[in-house]
Amino acid sequence: MTAIPAWLDRTAYPFQNRYLDLAAGRMHYVDEGHGSPMLFVHGTPTWSFEFRHLISAFSPGARVIAPDHLGFGLSSRPGDFAYTPEAHAANLIEFADRLDLRDITLVVHDFGGPIGLRLALDRPDRVARIVIINSWMWPFDDYPDMRRKAGIAGGSFGRFLYKYANFSLRVLAPSAYGDKTKLTPAIHRQYLEVFRDRHARVQVLHALAASLLGSRDYYQSLWRRVGELRRKPVLVVWGLKDSAFRPNQLDRWRRALPEATVVTLPAAGHWPHEEEPAAVIKAMGQWVNGPMRHGTH
């Protein structure tokens, strides 16, 4: 039996804790409700806690599944795991195969894009529809500003900041909120407590920072197949005040998936489902439960 940490806010996150032993390590996940599955794939430096509002909203009518990637949240932190997006993606595919998930509504955010969208590409029979929230699946070759920032974050100076200043959680995450007051101390604590250990910040968080440029070939391999996603209904929800993924990234999705439904939230930042959960729930609910006709709103 895995011990539940004392810092976990059971009022905000009242879900049953489940675990699955995969080849690389023990994965924690939430599995609430019944019906067609909705699979929520988080990014960095968070965990399934970021989807708590959506889990509560959709579990009465669907089977809502939200895993923590290895090293994050309540999952194990194996010492021999790569912690790159391609490693997390392979782990997620094993997770979906083991649970035999079908007719999935795949919801990806941040690094959840390059991690989760590989499931849609490699297991298209499992994924029925896709929701993309402030995410990507391409190399940053065409974005000099992002390449420059990624080079700093993923380099030796970034590694120092991640390790000793907890830079990812204390600086980068708050700065990407549209309204920073919405990241309350109580909410922030649920993310900070996971990475009190300095080594873990390097092992898990900085590994993804380094992969922004280091996993270029992997992103390119996904991007070459973006046309395959046009076979499925896609909803893009985008917080326009995101300092990490700016509107030009949304424009790329619009060009790549011209029939996708797009919902923009002008006041939200990188975590619209944390900042404006009611708006995200409304957008997703209308799209999932409606006719899902192609179009832009």
Image: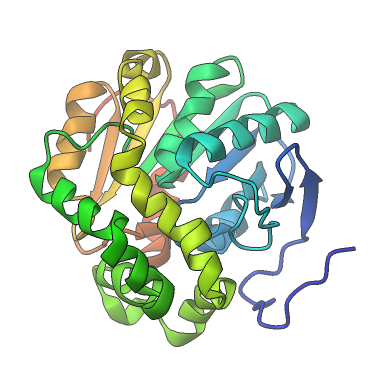
Quadrant housing residue 226: top left
Q: Is residue 288 above or below residue 2?
A: above
Quadrant housing residue 155: bottom left
Residue 265, percent from left and from top = 24, 55
Residue 269, percent from left and from top = 26, 61
Q: Is residue 38 above or below residue 181?
A: above
Q: Quadrant of the C terminus?
A: top left
Q: What residue is rendered at 15% in x and 35% in y?
A: 251
Q: Is residue 166 above or below residue 258?
A: below
Q: What residue is rendered at 77% in x and 60% in y?
A: 17
Q: Nearer the viewer, residue 237 or 193?
A: 193
Is 31 on the left-hand or right-hand side of 205? Answer: right
Residue 51, percent from left and from top = 53, 57
Q: What residue is rendered at 32% in x and 14% in y?
A: 227
Farthest bottom residue in view: 185
Farthest right residue in view: 1
